[in-house]
Amino acid sequence: MSVDQPNASTEPLLEVRGLVAEIGGVPALTGVNLEIHAGEIVALLGPNSSGKTTTLRAIMGLVAPARGTVEFRGAPLAGIPVEQRARLGVAYLPEGRRVFPGLSVQDNLAVACDADPEERRRRIDDIVELFFPLKERIKMPAWRLSGGLQQMTAIGRALMSDPLVMMLDEPSVGLAPAVLRDVLGRLRKVAERGTAILLAEQNAAAALAIADRAYVLDRGAVIAEGLAADFLIDSARQTPSPTLTASPIR
Amino acid sequence: MEPLQLIVDAFALGGVYVLVALGFVLVLNGIGAVNLAHGDLVTLGGFIAIAAASWVPMWPGIVFLPIIALVMAVVGALLAAITPMRRRSDTPEEMSLATFAVGVMLAAALTGLYGTTPISGPPLVGNGQIGLFGAAISRQSVVIILTAVILVPAVHLLLNHTQFGRRLRAAGQDPELARALGIDTRRMAAATFALGTMLAGIAGLLLADRFTISPTFGLDLLVKSYVAVAIAGWGQVGAAAGVALAIALFETAVSTVAAPAIADAVVYVVLLVLLAFQPQGMFGPAAQRRA
Amino acid sequence: MVNAVRSAPERPFLVAVPPAVAVAALLFYTASNAHGVRLATLAGIYALLVIGYQFVFGRLGALSLAQGAFFGLGAFVTARLGLADLPFLITFPAAIALPALVAALVVGPVLRLQSYYVPLVTLGLAQMLFIAALSSGDIAGVPTIMFLPGLELPRGPAFAIFVWVLAIVGALIAWSLSATHFGRFAEVVRDNPVAAGAVGLDAGRMRLQGFVLSAAYGGGAGALHAHLTGVVSPADFSLPVMIMCLAMATVGGRRHVTGGIVGVVLLNLAVEAAGLSPLYQPIFYGLMVLIALYWLPDGVLGLLERRFAPLSVVVSPAPQAIPARKAARIAGPLLAVRGITRRFGGVIAVDNVSLALHPGEILGMIGPNGSGKTTLLNALSGLSPAQTGRIFLSGRDITNLAPHEVARVGLARSFQTAQLADRLSALDNVAAARAALNGLDFGAIVQRARAETAFARARAEAMACLDIVNLVAAAATPASQLVPADRRRLEIARALALDPLVVAFDEPAAGLDADERDALAALLKQLAARGLGLIVVEHEVAFLRGIATRLACMDAGRLIAIGPPEIVMADPKVAAAYLGAGAVGGGRIK
């Protein structure tokens, strides 16, 4: 794990400034600032309802922010529709085993990859090697899979597209411990190839183990940020204690 | 009529049903809801052919095939624009209701223009016959069968073995997730309806050419392709085409000895019994909720 | 804390005023127009048709296309019996009963299934009846209403008043049905049949009730139409009637009885004022359906509701504790599972699993992804019944019970992905479970006051359940607007509302933060201390260690270890299959 701030000299790939958003009239984000560089894994931590999911959805364009900006490679994303953002290289794994139920495992993976068929096949083989319980179910429609296998398929789909920024919402949910370990290891490798990964996780210990940096959200705002290694973990509770972080609230 | 001619005609009717079911199942895959206007789009295609033939009576019917395919594709894209299918809050029931309204409007408009007496369209390739094993076979029937034989595998390949087909089905199953993967679901819905309506138009043209067409046929055609899809299993292309063909053959066979309505009633009863005992169709559903 | 919960019957203003205005407009038109009386009579007939249709289209959300055919069938029966000089007291009940019977026999069994077959089955039925009607052709000379030989009701103002009296009776019956299960919780069936089963509601039976009721109303409307016009033709069975009915229901408001009346009057007057010929009326009605779908999703009534009856009208009830289950507990295990197997095609998802659960026990269930844990829970709760083996709950064989029956006898569960009625409030998602137990069946029609009390108590008890999982603040929020963690909590509240003996949780801690997880652990221990038996499927081994009295591990559909947590965790088979060593199992494929 890198100890120095990675790519500190370069421009951030994704920069979020002063993001404010409401969901159904209730404030969800009250001012979120964060940035992420190429090749970095950034953990987004915090209790439920603290705004992690809304932050990811706002970056993807699925939630329209009331105020604030999202810049991708230096250009604002405001007004750009969701599908366009995806094509620019922002990938998003929503929470909760979202697969296309009627597509086979293979098609669920293939649909996310616009490379040529040869490359697509190569990537599918690669994913199936990582999640080998999928191998014997590759032709099975996704709705027949168990929840954990659906989550594997969904994560695999996120890995298929080879994006610039990959946002994952609670990828650990429903995965058996051994599988979770493999998934996190794989994310590290993906980051090493230059993809920026934003990881919203309840399982702080697992996220911090592979992250370079972390932000802690509470009630819609960033209350702490710093290098992952500097977050002290209360091992019994598996939560970072934000009072002891490297850099205090801005 | 000679037995061979009868059999070929049965297959020709089957070819039409197959084409109708093909467009129906395509739209079902692409928007995740039943297109209840599909049967009336078939008759619309037939009547456009009849109208076109009256403007340029010298042209052979085959010339109209690409023209009608194109016109109907535009109609389909327009239909996609006016049915409320892109808002996340719309349930499949609401989408189907919108298409039902469109279908009823189409049928009423066509009835106003043409009445309900069945009429025939322009001959496709001349009314001639071709000899086969010593029997005279209608050329029209052969063209219809060939069209179905080409289009069924084409649509199956398109849906199941191309990236476009995967994206089309994905957009129908989870529009939000599809958008997050870079799929323009609006454009996909337009493409889906354009293709499905194009197939409906081709089916309508062929139906009007070889058989007859009336605005009241829409509902009947819709029910038949819907039955085919339900028996085959939700969303399955090849199986739906097979069942549609079987329905046509059965109908022709029954109509040689009894009223065609008897065949319809039998098909409906078979459907009810099948749904009561084998609710997922014979070849399983494409998708359902898993708890 | 004050919460608002939307509830239709509690706003008399909206129930009474719009139809009164509509009927007044109709009367005004009647008085000023030569065809006015006939028009008013037709409006009353259509009101019955549409009010009936709302049971299935508005409440159950099912797109039935047979309402026009039921109308035609009622008219046909009336014509045949009327021409045989039978009195109204025989013809009218017959015209109601036959469509209801057809709905029960033909549509009923099939509608226990997926909702996407509804348009097909109903359209097919409509088509069959239409073809049958074509073969019998027009029937002319249907007499007007004859109460007794010599006592006839002439067509005209008196006929119109009689029709409207029947329409109002029909509306009142529909309104009084709102106190029953069907009236209160048809929306659960509409939103999510799995959720209906989980709260103990029989979705198939409620669909059947809705269809039979709508057919009865449609038949009655058709009978009156035959008496009015004196002619029954195949057109009475056809699509124009159906699209008219759809347009009136969508424009007026498909969920409200009164919306039906408003829609009928509005569109009737519009068609009359524009002088549309019958040929082009379907185009107008189709257009109205599209317009309503776009701009009036809940019709005129929905618009008025949003404008004049904001949410803050109703205050949520004070919590009231659930009375304890009276069922006597027998000696022995609470839940006994004996050698159950479940196959899907060639895959054995659950393979000869046996286990026992005792009161006060928390059985943690671990295993690799795809090892059959959820399938086991589905077999226990009746969602996908075991193919071999037996399941006993407190000594009672529950192997082949349907999900709603399993829920009622005391085995509740939560799901990996929360299964809730999305458009209902959090409170009513839970109240549905209480109501299913407290009993709000059709007896509620005659004993409305008692039913209202029972419903109020169901909500108060539901509030207590929400309090246990700390969701009181969200009581009025529609389930769809809750974040995933709250949806999980709502499922737990719903399970508790069933006052269960055993609760099976499927990954209850997934997506919860550390504080919430601690609270959940405390809650589960508290439930066990009350004598419940709990099964908890979880991947968070740390979480399970804190609460489980025993641990079970599944692999490839088999139970490979069961016993005290420390022993199971130390088992080399468990380590190999689940905890590491790279091995990830799966169901065996043959």
Image (cartoon, rainbow, N blue to C red):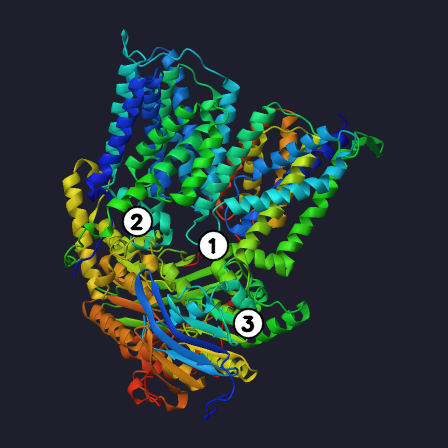
- Residue mark closest to the camera, 3 vs 2: 3
Q: Position of residue C113 (x, y in %)?
A: 43, 46
Mark 1 lies on residue: B288
Residues at marks 3 and 2, common chain?
no
Q: Which of C10 and A59 lies nearest the eye of the viewer?
A: A59
- Residue type at mark 1 is Gln
Q: What chain letter is assigned to the residue under label 3?
A: A
Mark 3 lies on residue: A89
- Residue type at mark 3 is Gly
Q: In which image quadrant can residue B43 be found?
A: top right
Q: Position of residue C270 (x, y in %)?
A: 39, 28
View extreme (bottom): residue: A3
The numbered mark at residue C472 is none
Q: Position of residue B14 (x, y in %)?
A: 66, 37
User: Helix, strand, or loop for circle 3?
Assistant: loop
Instruction: Specify the quadrant that holds the C terminus of chain B.
Output: bottom left
User: In the visual, does B174 lie left or right of B203?
Assistant: left
- Residue type at mark 2 is Leu
User: In the visual, does A205 lie left or right of B52?
Assistant: left
Q: Which of C169 and C539 lies nearest the eye of the viewer?
A: C169
Q: What chain letter is assigned to the residue under label 1?
A: B
Q: Residues within 10 Å of mark 2 (few under 14, many from 20)?
A: many
Instruction: Specify the quadrant that holds the N terminus of chain B.
Output: top right
Identify which residue is drawn at 26% across, 19% down.
C161
Q: What chain letter is assigned to the residue under label 2?
A: C
The numbered mark at residue C201 is 2
Q: In which image quadrant can residue B157 be found?
A: bottom right
Q: Is residue B254 above or below residue C209?
A: above
Q: CA distance from mark 1 to mark 3?
A: 31 Å
